[in-house]
Structures are given as structure tokens and as C-alpha cells.
């Protein structure tokens, strides 16, 4: 699976424009994918200054990314630079148990290092767990009508150049050829640019619920939102 599209101008994207290729993620992209995850993982913004334990956050967030039996991970690259990625799981229901198991085992592995947790880490993970226990990240199942899921992130320096559009087109093509009836995924009301991006591509809001998780860092009344799109 590989698609290409011209960005503005010629040469390398990110310098003077050029071609972006959408290719399956391989070992050489892993470090960049993890870096982009950290720089976009806080409602579309960087976690710099929010958490110090970068490795734990990225491990948890990307835990199913590299499991080829459950999902495809595609990246946009140009001139050896990884610009963004899209995680695509045709059967999102199959992610549930592996994800829960990984969360437990990865968290347990962190216990010996708890003494090294900074105040920022403690606040972040305490708030996360408290929100999870209040059910703020839970939502009704959409497996039947929207069996697939995806997750997209483009590095800030490569946004608004068509990279996300290319990734989304490749993901939808993949899911349609798989025969998926539809796709759903979670975002937040803080991801304003992403919400505009999804609406412009035919996605609609399926569900939303308030979360207090972000209250420490922002005054907005934040909602977790499930977006979806049917393919047939
Ligand atoms: C949301 C996100 C994935 C979109 O990716 P992107 O690469 O910025 O998206 P694109 O450039 O394809 O499209 C964005 C806008 O840029 C503009 N654009 C597209 N191609 C362009 C080009 N060649 N030159 C200039 N502008 C262009 C379009 O107007 C588009 O607007 P539209 O959404 O109204 O169509 C990206 O901004 C992102 O990763 N954000 C932070 C992380 C995040 O919130 N992720 C979602 C988690 S749920």
C-alpha cells in the first residue's frame, strides 16, 4: 500500500515542498513515531512541561501500534523525514483486551521507578486514573455500526500541508478494501484543528461527555468526543 501526492512546489516536503509518500511503518520510523506521539499527545499539543516520564506516556499511548495482527500503522515520509502517522485497526473490538493487559503489565513494570516520578508525572497520572475511574474516557460501544478505529497525528512542523489528508485517504482506502462498515475514534473538544479536519472529511460526532482531566491545565469545559463515519 503506497500513495503519493504533490505538496506545494518541488523538492522535500518541509523545505521547499515536494512529495509525501504513505508507506507502512517499519523499524526505521519507530523513533520518529514515538516522538510525534509525545509532541501531539496532549489534545493535539505537546506533553513537554506536562509530563516528565516521556517513555511511560509513549509506551502506553502506542502500545497497540506495532502489533501487526491487530492493526496497520502507516507513516507519511519525505526525504527520509517522518511527517506523521495513522494507526488503523479494522476490528477495534480486538484491541480492548490486549490494551488492558498491556496497561496493567506496563504500569506494574514502572513501580520500581516510582521514586523517580516527578511532581508533574504524579499529577498527570493521578488525574488520568481519577478521570478513568469516573468513567470519563468510557463511551457506548460503536463496534457494530463503526467496527474500525483510527488514530492520526502529524508533526507540528508538517501540519496544514496536506499530510493529514493523504494519511486519512490511505486509511479509508485500506478500511474500505477490508470491507469495514465504518470507523470511530476518540478525540476531545480541545483538538479544534482536528475537529475541523474530521468534519470537512465527512465525520460526525457520535457521542460526547465532559471530562475534568484537563482542568489543571486549561479552563475550558472540556469534552471527550467520539467521531465516526460510515463507509456503507
Ligand atoms: C488534525 C491533523 C491530523 C490534520 O493533519 P494536517 O496534516 O494538518 O492536515 P491537512 O494539511 O491535510 O489539512 C488541514 C488543512 O490544511 C489545509 N491544506 C491541505 N493541504 C494543503 C496544502 N498543500 N497547503 C496548504 N494548506 C493545505 C486544508 O485547508 C486543510 O483544511 P480542511 O481540514 O478544511 O480541509 C493534524 O493537524 C494533527 O496531527 N494535529 C495535532 C494532533 C491531533 O489533534 N491529532 C488528532 C488526535 S484525535
Image (cartoon, helix red, strand yellow):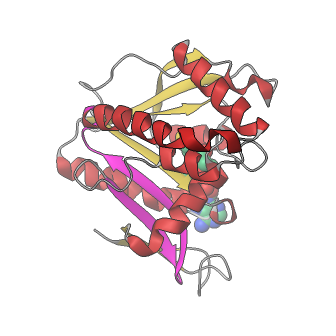
Magenta highlight range: 72-93
Q: Quadrant of residue 222?
A: top right
Left or right: residue 161 versus residue 101 is right
Q: Could you say where residue 130 lies in the image, as x and y percent from the top left?
A: 61, 18
Q: Could you say where residue 124 lies in the image, as x and y percent from the top left?
A: 69, 33
Q: Quadrant of residue 213?
A: top right
Instruction: Note whether residue 57 is visible.
Output: yes
Residue 82 sits inside the magenta stretch: yes
Residue shown at 63%/39% (left/top)?
Answer: 114
Give the position of the N terminus as an image quadrant: bottom left
Residue located farthest toward the top when viewing the structure as drawn: 134
Residue shown at 61%/27% (left/top)?
Answer: 128
Q: Is residue 222 above or below residue 168?
A: above
Left or right: residue 50 versus residue 171 is right
Task: State ligand 1's quadrant.
Answer: bottom right
Residue 205 sits inside the magenta stretch: no
Residue shown at 62%/21% (left/top)?
Answer: 223
Q: Is residue 18 above or below residue 43?
A: below
Q: Is residue 232 above or below residue 201?
A: above
Instruction: Note whether residue 230 is visible.
Output: no
Left or right: residue 127 versus residue 4 is right
Residue shown at 24%/48% (left/top)?
Answer: 176
Q: Could you say where residue 69 lies in the image, as x and y percent from the top left?
A: 22, 52
Q: Is residue 132 above or below residue 66?
A: above
Amino acid at each position: 500500500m503506497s500513495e503519493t501526492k504533490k505538496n506545494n512546489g518541488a523538492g522535500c516536503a518541509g523545505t521547499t515542498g515536494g512529495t509525501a509518500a504513505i508507506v507502512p511503518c517499519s523499524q526505521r520510523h519507530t523513533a520518529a513515531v514515538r516522538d510525534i506521539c509525545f509532541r501531539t499527545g496532549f489534545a493535539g499539543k505537546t506533553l513537554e512541561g506536562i509530563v516528565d516520564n516521556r517513555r511511560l506516556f509513549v509506551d502506553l499511548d502506542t502500545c497497540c501500534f506495532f502489533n501487526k495482527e491487530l492493526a496497520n500503522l502507516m507513516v507519511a515520509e519525505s526525504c527520509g523525514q517522518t511527517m506523521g502517522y495513522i494507526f488503523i485497526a479494522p476490528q477495534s473490538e480486538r484491541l480492548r483486551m490486549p490494551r488492558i493487559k498491556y496497561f496493567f503489565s506496563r504500569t506494574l513494570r514502572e513501580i520500581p521507578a516510582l521514586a523517580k516520578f516527578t511532581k508533574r508525572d504524579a499529577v498527570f497520572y493521578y488525574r488520568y486514573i481519577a478521570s478513568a475511574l469516573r468513567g470519563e474516557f468510557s463511551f457506548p460501544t460503536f463496534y457494530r455500526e463503526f467496527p474500525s478505529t483510527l488514530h492520526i497525528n502529524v508533526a507540528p512542523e508538517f501540519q496544514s500541508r496536506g499530510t493529514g489528508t493523504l494519511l486519512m485517504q490511505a486509511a479509508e482506502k485500506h478500511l474500505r478494501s477490508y470491507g469495514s462498515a465504518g470507523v470511530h475514534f476518540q478525540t476531545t473538544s480541545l483538538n479544534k484543528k482536528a475537529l475541523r479536519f474530521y468534519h470537512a472529511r465527512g465525520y460526525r460526532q457520535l457521542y460526547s461527555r465532559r471530562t475534568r482531566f484537563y482542568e489543571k491545565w486549561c479552563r475550558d469545559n472540556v469534552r471527550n468526543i467520539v467521531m465516526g463515519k460510515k463507509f456503507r
